[in-house]
Amino acid sequence: MAISRAPQAFPRSEYMRRITAVKAEMERWGVEALVISDANNITYLSGYTALSAYVPQALLVSIREQEPTFILRQCDAPAALHETFMERDRIISYPESLIGNPEKNGYDAVIDHIQEAGYAKQSIGVELDDLPSRAPDKFKSRLPASKIVDCSKLATWIRLVKSDLEIAVMRECAAISDAAVLRAAEVIRPGVREADVIAEIVGTLVRGANGKPGTRIPPVYLCASPRTGTCHIPWADDVFRQGSQINLELGGSRHGYYAGLMRTYSIGAPSERLRRIHEIQVEGLEAALEAIRPGATCSDVANAFCRTIGKQGLKKETRCGYAHGIGWLEPTASLKDGDTTILVPNMTFHLMLGNWIDEDFGYVISETFRVSQSGVEVLTAAPRKIFEL
Amino acid sequence: MAISRAPQAFPRSEYMRRITAVKAEMERWGVEALVISDANNITYLSGYTALSAYVPQALLVSIREQEPTFILRQCDAPAALHETFMERDRIISYPESLIGNPEKNGYDAVIDHIQEAGYAKQSIGVELDDLPSRAPDKFKSRLPASKIVDCSKLATWIRLVKSDLEIAVMRECAAISDAAVLRAAEVIRPGVREADVIAEIVGTLVRGANGKPGTRIPPVYLCASPRTGTCHIPWADDVFRQGSQINLELGGSRHGYYAGLMRTYSIGAPSERLRRIHEIQVEGLEAALEAIRPGATCSDVANAFCRTIGKQGLKKETRCGYAHGIGWLEPTASLKDGDTTILVPNMTFHLMLGNWIDEDFGYVISETFRVSQSGVEVLTAAPRKIFEL
């Protein structure tokens, strides 16, 4: 029996818009076919969100064909038929014999398809940045008549500017993020295990907000005393104490999109040092938001933040944020000094102002925003305060 | 101020045992220094579990030095000081200017360290399989006097045979897996959203069992009707219905280790087809367990399963399991026909008998086991039944 098609997150016309934009870039780069292997770009161009990217898989976009072709592992093909907008004959599965096989793998199936589809003498784009180290040689040696062109980030840059439909999904994500930040404030208490609080936070991220569930488990980082100088520890096998500070980073997720949000909590009154850092950072955050408008650069936004906190003797080592959407971090524009990317409406970023000041002391605050016609729309809405518990 | 060291999951002697085993293999492969970039191998050899592997980082193991050196991003160094067993001077951080920089990245910092530490004219092992495609050229061009040796999976193969201390952690993981499978049976009901059940399952996986919390959010796949022919959809924006079948794959996690477990649920009486498949599969599972003993091969175990279900006209396309431990799937031995890996005590596997039979119909059952002195110890203990709800 045939598997049914799931209700789609976006209409077919939205995917065709994205694919048309990719094809226009392909023309510019001079490639006839493009092998999309980055899992987030696959989500963007097809709607596929199953977690099968630990084995090779690729979406082949051709200048000549309307829909892309998705080549993936046999057992994952039903998920592609269910989740994507594409016609049934665009899903090509490769056999299980290519799994755990040191001689041949799924990229061989992708290359077989390229040959069969008649692209073997064409110019073919690949996402070199995302391929494992041995894959490029396979493409080069098995497609000797092709010109292999590095198209890393060709599609990724297109993702940076969202459609209104994507912004609507990111608003739903942001509402979930807000709910989880507020839930954390209800459950963080002295003597409670960090794991028990994470269970409540993740529960909220999954149950969602406004009747819209989260559709994936997002990254959550909870770095509490004595770990507030760290940034990527999800949580520890530890309990909260009177006087603990808690730095939380999380993000609601729907249909592959995220909306990141960071807030700082204190059990009991925050220290004078923490309160002072918070005031400076919020002032910097407001200055950064003030700098966001079409025509400004990423660098302008970062420098507005750094100038403001610098006046009070504070600096931040890590960048002030990054392009944000499918898969959390979009590896394109960064909010940092020297990034000359020009802001245009509907670009979305995580304005990530976590500041790890000393080995044993850090503070976090962030917002997810979109560039609007006249300035900025902040999608996340949790209070910009130290949550005092 | 200096960050404190966290309570360690394993004593220093356990890490030294692992490193000694890696050094013995390095001698055999003829390398003086080994660049460990696989995040799970880093966890294995250092205790580091923070989620920072989305940027370059590496543990450098040297034949000449007792402890390895960990080179990672500056903002992640406090987590390394907190989590790992190593001395403070073994943690080397690289500056933020190497992040989001198209010219230089963290691998340049790793190479700088190799040069400074005097290995530039030595034979240096790298994990080629796990490096992104541009990194090997960086090593080759910046270390022209070195012999670069592909040591992919050198350390990964050592992980396959666990110590008793590791087995104890995997037992804790298995108890959490069992608790989550039972919790799912309590909450899956007609009309309930899949997301609400996932929230309960993940809550249990994080809260843990026997007073031991889960320490990471593990992968969870819930493929319910009409999606039981898929295997890697975490859950859908959908509700359960009377008559729904639910295929669940999950695993408790502690200190980076996992214990995978799959069970099938039915709301109302299972169909005759489902009941029949279940009986055949359980018979196959028992035959596979029977075949496990020191001296048998991975192939023997898979063939015992396939022969048994084959007698009743059933076959399974995907492999019957894989080496299992840190990071879920260890990419070494597979339980599949032709894998001649010989079983020895304390090897651990996920005996993964999910069987996706038709595009719209699959069934799942699995166990996590260790090879014992005399045969097999199954670590997971949930009832081997279709949970009828």
Image (cartoon, coloured by chain):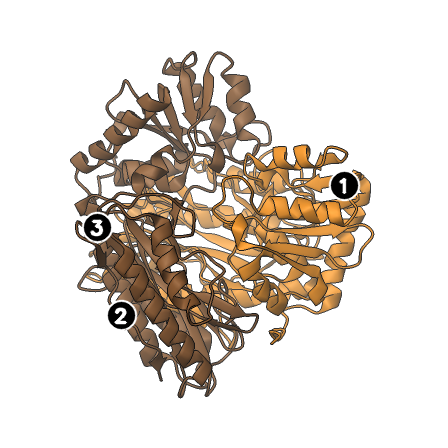
Chain colours: A brown, B orange
What amino acid type is highlighted by mark number 2? Ala
The N terminus of chain A: image quadrant: top left
Q: Which residue is mark 1?
A: B120
Pick whichever of labels 2 and 3 is earlier in the sequence: 3
For the residues marked 2 and 3, what is the alpha-carbon distance in whole angstroms? 18 Å
Label 2 sits on a secondary structure element that is: loop
Label 1 sits on a secondary structure element that is: loop
Front position in the image: B260 or B77: B77
The residue positioned 74% from the left and 45% from the top of the image is: B115
Q: Which mark is residue A167?
A: 3
Label 2: how many Cα within 10 Å (few below 14, some 14–19, many 20+): some
The residue positioned 72% from the left and 41% from the top of the image is: B125
Same chain, labels 3 and 1: no
Front position in the image: A98 or B347: A98
Q: Which residue is mark 2?
A: A382
Q: Which mark is residue A231?
A: none
What amino acid type is highlighted by mark number 3? Ile
Judge whether A283 appears above or below A255 on screen: below
